Amino acid sequence: MYSSYDVIVVGAGHAGCEAANAAATMGSKVLLITMNMQTIAQMSCNPAMGGVAKGQIVREVDALGGMSGIISDKSMIQFRMLNRSKGPAMWSPRCQSDRNVFAWEWRKALEENKNIDFWQDTVTEILVKDNRVKGVKTSLGVEFVAKAVVLTNGTFLNGKMFIGEKVFGGGRTAERSSTGLTEQLVSLGFEAGRMKTGTPPRVDGRSLNYALMEEQLGDENPGKFSYTNTTALTKQRSCWITYTNQAVHDELKTGFDKSPMFTGRIKGLGPRYCPSVEDKINRFADKDRHQIFVEPEGWDTVEVYVNGFSTSLPEIVQYNALRKISGFENVRMFRPGYAVEYDFFPPTQLKPTLETQLVHNLFFAGQINGTTGYEEAACQGLMAGINAHRNVNEEAEFTIKRSEGYIGVLIDDLITKGTEEPYRMFTSRAEYRTLLRQDNADLRLTEKGYAIGLASQERYDSMTAKKSDIAQLTDAIRLTKVKPEEINGLLESKGSALLREKGSLYTLLKRPEIEQSDVKNILNALPDMPRVGEEIVEQTVIEIKYEDYLSREKVNAEKLDKWENLSINPAFDYDRLKALSFEGKEKLKRLKPSTIGQASRISGVSPSDVSILLVYMGR
């Protein structure tokens, strides 16, 4: 026997890195087991973090004390705030990353955490006794004892890779799959399924003609993900946009008879919102072109990621089709795209903490739960690591409500609704998205992260100072009256009604014609205004402009939170309630919701079933 640990994390992808770092930072002795020490925090797919709703998740992870935001800031080569033309609930930060720097910075951060040990090996068995995890066993026959285990196996469980008619075992290019663990978990009573994902070819940037593409620049004043004092970009690399065409589509169709997706050799379901290029031209036959994003893989490499061209067609078909894309006429391909099919475990088998219902102190996080995306994996790893540590120390469970964060929405969706396709986060999944903006994640969550010992004192102090600055500026704006001669010039240029006498600045800022840039100029022209940073001004203006919407959402959230606070004993006997519908009863017995709120969101549990539960509980 080797040394025993508080927490063992299996897998060192985005979920595993966050899980290990969180548990160790909070004080647990952690062992991180990975099949390859050289691929810790590997960006298996596109070299980017964030995006619509995903950027909000990265900021929430950072606000709680996680590392994904800091690592992204240290490795980004371009930053863009998406959806600026829409309301602030839709603004989503995204960065293009240097793949190698991202992985190196993560490994460096983990090695600097003195509570983390490492072991390179494959876990083949979970050691379980009396429905309680006791450790793991590896392919070398080594047994490690632990009080809690977090599985973050990604696409490696019985992974199969497909390129045309070629099929070989693996979870990622040049890396073998993991076998044995699925079968053991199924023998313990877990339900398993199959999913698929894919990746596009990588090409030589020196062989591309960028003059035939549209340049996509980063923001003029690039932002960042972390609320800490990470350094913002001073230079950026461009991305590029080009398009497929009918000739590309015709070339791709020549390989359809050898496509593993169309011939039925891939059984797992793929991501609906990130389909392969062959799937796109088959499903959207009326479209004569599809967008291709040409993304550099780092500062000092010529390797380019062809975003939008995910495929598992034969490599010669991929190559011939690529050469018909504008700007790719002389392309040299580094490696072809491929599809990966892998095992996952329906997440309805989990508690809100991501602990499994069947085995105490065994946690699942990331693609093993049927999700897709680095950001979705990272936040699950963070929450699993937090709760593994808290379970080991017999502390109360830590969860995020749907009204408190996208993290809460994601986990609640998974454990109550499950997923039959790779789950991806969108802003439309959050009913309180005006509250859950990327700009206020620290105000929502840093105090929670600080209370559990994950967010540092420095983070907490920074958040409280920000809150104080916002309150001070808001009060000053409320008390300020502006004269017509001070503001009418701007109002006239905006086509807004002019002032005839002194008016409230607070009311003026609510006008839709008054934009963020206008507010800065107005405040700078008023000598009595507090001098605060741009972030404080932006946050204050959002809160003022959307005050009515925010108030309504808060009221609705408070109403529904009453149900979230009504706990249900996991051992509750639903058969005692004869009035429950048959489907409702079966779903409640299988999913074991922890609160009335969670029970109300389970598909098949009717409003009348919820009413019956409330009556039984005296509510």
Image: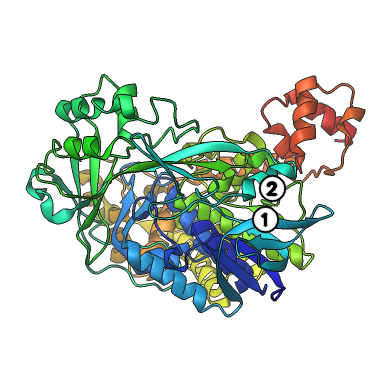
Q: Determine the secondary structure under disc 2.
A: helix
Residue 300 visible from this viewpoint? yes
How many numbered marks have been drawn onto this rendered protein structure? 2
Query: In the rendered structure, which disc, 2 or 1, sits on the residue that comes first in sequence?
Result: 1
Q: Is residue 394 left or right of 252 when viewed as pictured?
A: right
Q: Position of residue 159 (x, y in %)?
A: 49, 45
Quadrant location of the C terminus in the rendered image: top right
Residue at 37% x, 34% y is 275
- Find disc 2 in the rendering and name its residue: 184
**Disc 2/disc 1 C-alpha distance (Å):** 7 Å
Query: Residue 125: which numbered mark, if any?
Result: 1
Q: Position of residue 354 (x, y in %)?
A: 66, 51
Outermost residue, right side = 576
Q: Quadrant of residue 3?
A: bottom right
Crowding at mark 2 (Cα within 10 Å: few <14, some 14-19, many 20+) = some
* Residue type for callout 1: Glu
Q: Quadrant of residue 26?
A: bottom right
Residue closer to the observer: 611 or 544: 611
Q: Position of residue 235 (x, y in %)?
A: 22, 67
Q: Determine the secondary structure under disc 1.
A: strand
Residue at 63% x, 50% y is 181
* Residue type for callout 2: Gln
Q: Quadrant of residue 32?
A: bottom right
Residue 402 visible from this viewpoint? no
In this rendering, the answer to whether 538 lies above or below 416 is below
In this rendering, the answer to whether 314 lies above or below 476 is above
Q: State if disc 1 and disc 2 touch (CB < 8 Å).
A: yes
